[in-house]
Amino acid sequence: MSKVFIAASAAIVAFASPPAAAHGYGKGDIQVRHPWTRVTPPGAMVGAGYLEIRNSGKKPDRVIGASTPAAERVELHVMTHEGDVMKMREVPGFEVPARQRFALRPGGSHLMIVGLKKPLVKGDRIPLTLRFERAGEVLVEFEVQAGDSRKPHH
């Protein structure tokens, strides 16, 4: 077998392989990076999910829903300031502008994971499906991190 053929085959395999979780999950123009959540105390029924969405396309997209087998439902939430009070409210979707990033972070937009079937334990990985208006479904795995985490660990 020639060295050229072996090198070309390796390049095709590397290119065709799906991205590793550390680099992100994606479909079409949408890439989801660093999905994570925090440990929950025993008996907790609610958790929150955070991640970054990158849209490399020429058209905007929109997150229109999410689900996980780890909970009864997943809600899309935003935080707003009304005077000196910060309020959380459910929204029907998150806009992801063309050629931009949209981040879900603590204290801001996030996924509310409601009706947990068991506590979230550090080191666990939680499967979650994001539904996009244009890109369709993107399956990701949330890494459960320490309760005091403020950003994803790499």
Image (cartoon, rainbow, N blue to C red):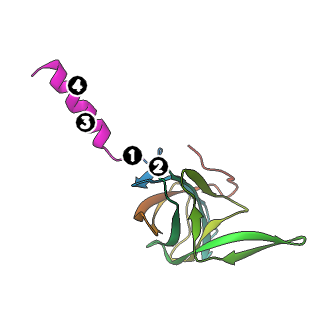
Q: Disc 4 designates what residue?
A: 7
Q: Disc 3 designates what residue?
A: 12
Q: What is the distance, in whole Å, between disc 1 and disc 3 at their CAs?
A: 14 Å
Quarter containing the N terminus: top left
The amino acid on which the numbered mark 2 sits, given as a three-letter code, is: Gly
Q: Disc 2 designates what residue?
A: 24
Q: What is the distance, in whole Å, between disc 4 and disc 3 at their CAs?
A: 9 Å
**Dot 4 or dot 1, earlier in sequence:** 4
**Which quarter of the figure has residue 77?**
bottom right
The amino acid on which the numbered mark 1 sits, given as a three-letter code, is: Pro
Whether pointer 1 and pointer 2 mark residues with C-beta atoms closer than 8 Å, the reply is yes
Helix, strand or loop under label 4: helix
Q: Magenta segment range?
A: 1-20
The rendered magenta stretch, by its main secondary structure, is classed as helix
Give the label, 1 or 3, closer to the camera. 3
Residue located 30% across and 36% down the image: 14
Number of residues whose C-alpha sits closer than 10 Å to that of mark 2, classed few (under 14), some (14–19) or many (20 or more): some
Helix, strand or loop under label 2: loop
**Dot 1 or dot 2, earlier in sequence:** 1
Q: Disc 1 designates what residue?
A: 19
